[in-house]
């Protein structure tokens, strides 16, 4: 018998981009309506590199919440080759910083201040391992010789495995995985390695980026891969390894910046994400495992309690808006204008 209603512990989003200013004020309420907490990415311009900047950014996010919301933004610091380990440790101890984000310099949007030589951050990583502060990794090499579709798999071999050998006690989240190599490596990588999975990487492959013409709103980084990779990532999400969890990588950009001669990477998926995840678990016949992926595995890995309340999803249809207005800008949601199956009921 197919389910039409599902109640689960309130989920968290372990990877999101809120941006700042008007865009932040437009997108924060959408996330806060669904998730208990979210890990907030620090790739603002300029990036959020220090604890005091993260505290100020957190205050701006909290000010954008609707009255009565108990949503908690969990802040991250952007790792640079000059990051001060004492600043991170103090921010972590004060409850301001939850984790640190590694962007290889040049890998993606606003990553120029990121890390060029991973060995230059050894001391910071050692300190993070000591205090139990997770490292969140954008896992793509930036070597221009490496084909864009191979950058994640090569990152695992060239950067991640040696890093894990040097820092066996460091908790690492490989963010937004897109490949069979990542899906297979995480379960065998030990208790300190986890991965987030986006809704779009469960649904689209690289052919979808060009279906009937170029589809700028499906362009994100890491880019969608071949179908065999999508299937492997999907199997990981719905499987039994409890170190895979929900991270939307929702990354809003104005429509004009996506529909451009050089369109930028990022998919704004907040309104559709939970519905997509539910449909994927349903299609795989394991709707009962959605709660682990969405609500339990993340807190377990981060050493946080699970949310105390629940949400109920019903299979009654949800219309995804054509656009979200943020000041003078419009942001096009993932699945814009479509009706999806699962919706959050009040
Ligand atoms: O597609 C992406 N967009 N990937 C990232 O890693 C960054 C993000 C953004 O900030 O727009
Ligand atoms: Zn991201």
Image: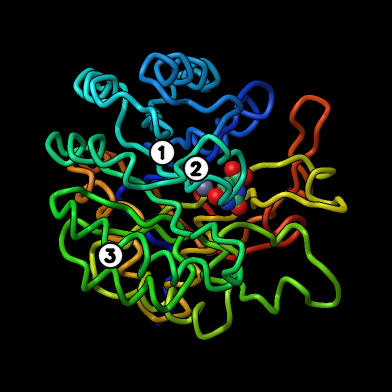
Against 61, residue 294 (above or below) is below
Checking the image for residue 175, the label placed there is none
Q: Looking at the picture, how far across and down is residue 179, in whole percent?
A: 46, 74
Checking the image for residue 161, the label placed there is 3
In the rendered view, does 121 fall on the left or right side of 305? right
Which of the two residues, 345 or 32, is positioned nearer the viewer here?
Answer: 32
Q: Where, quadrant-wise, is the N terminus in this rendering?
A: bottom left
Checking the image for residue 38, the label placed there is 1
Q: Residue beneath label 2, please?
A: 16
Label 1 CB sits under 8 Å from any ligand 2 atom: no
Separation of marks 2 and 1 at Cα, in angstroms: 7 Å
| Quarter of the figure with residue 243 | bottom left
N-terminal of the pair, mark 2 or mark 1, is 2
N-terminal of the pair, mark 3 or mark 1, is 1
| Residue at 36% over, 32% down | 74
Q: Looking at the picture, how far across and down is residue 287, in whole percent?
A: 37, 71
What SS does tag 2 mark? strand
| Residue 250 seen in render | no
N-terminal of the pair, mark 3 or mark 2, is 2
Label 2 CB sits under 8 Å from any ligand 2 atom: yes
In the rendered view, does 152 fall on the left or right side of 309? right
- For label 2, the crowd category at 10 Å Cα-Cα, with few meaning under 14, some 14 to 19 and many 20 or more, is many
| Residue 303 seen in render | yes
What SS does tag 1 mark? strand
Against 106, residue 160 (above or below) is below
Separation of marks 3 and 1 at Cα, in angstroms: 27 Å
State if disc 1 and disc 2 touch (CB < 8 Å). Answer: yes
């Amino acid at each position: 018998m197919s389910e039409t209603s599902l109640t689960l512990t309130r989920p968290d989003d372990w990877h999101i981009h809120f941006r700042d200013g008007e865009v932040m004020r437009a997108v924060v309420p959408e996330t806060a309506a669904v998730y208990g907490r979210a890990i907030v990415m620090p790739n603002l311009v300029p990036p959020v590199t220090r604890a005091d900047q993260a505290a100020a950014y957190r205050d701006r996010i909290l000010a954008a919440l609707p009255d009565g919301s108990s949503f908690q933004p969990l802040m991250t610091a952007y790792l640079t080759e000059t990051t001060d380990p004492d600043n991170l440790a103090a921010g972590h101890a004060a409850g301001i910083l939850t984790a640190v984000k590694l962007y290889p310099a040049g890998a993606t949007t606003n990553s120029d201040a990121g890390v060029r030589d991973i060995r230059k951050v050894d001391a910071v990583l050692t300190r993070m391992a000591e205090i139990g502060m997770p490292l969140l990794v954008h896992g793509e090499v930036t070597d221009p010789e490496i084909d864009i579709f191979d950058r994640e798999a090569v990152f695992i071999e060239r950067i991640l495995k040696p890093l894990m050998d040097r820092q066996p006690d460091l908790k690492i989240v490989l963010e937004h995985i897109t490949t069979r190599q990542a899906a297979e490596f995480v379960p065998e990588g030990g208790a300190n390695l986890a991965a987030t999975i986006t809704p779009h990487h469960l649904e689209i492959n690289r052919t979808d980026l060009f279906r009937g013409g170029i589809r700028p709103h499906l362009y994100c980084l890491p880019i969608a891969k071949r179908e065999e990779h999508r299937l492997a990532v999907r199997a990981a999400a719905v499987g039994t390894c409890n170190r895979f969890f929900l991270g939307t990588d929702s990354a809003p950009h104005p429509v004009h910046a996506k529909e451009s001669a050089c369109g930028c990477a990022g998919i704004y998926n907040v309104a559709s994400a939970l519905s997509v995840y539910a449909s994927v678990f349903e299609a795989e016949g394991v709707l009962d495992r959605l709660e682990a992926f969405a609500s339990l595995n993340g807190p377990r890995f981060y050493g946080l309690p699970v949310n105390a309340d629940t949400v109920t999803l019903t299979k009654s249809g949800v219309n995804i808006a054509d656009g979200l207005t943020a000041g003078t800008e419009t942001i096009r949601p993932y699945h814009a204008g479509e009706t999806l199956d699962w919706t959050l009921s009040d």
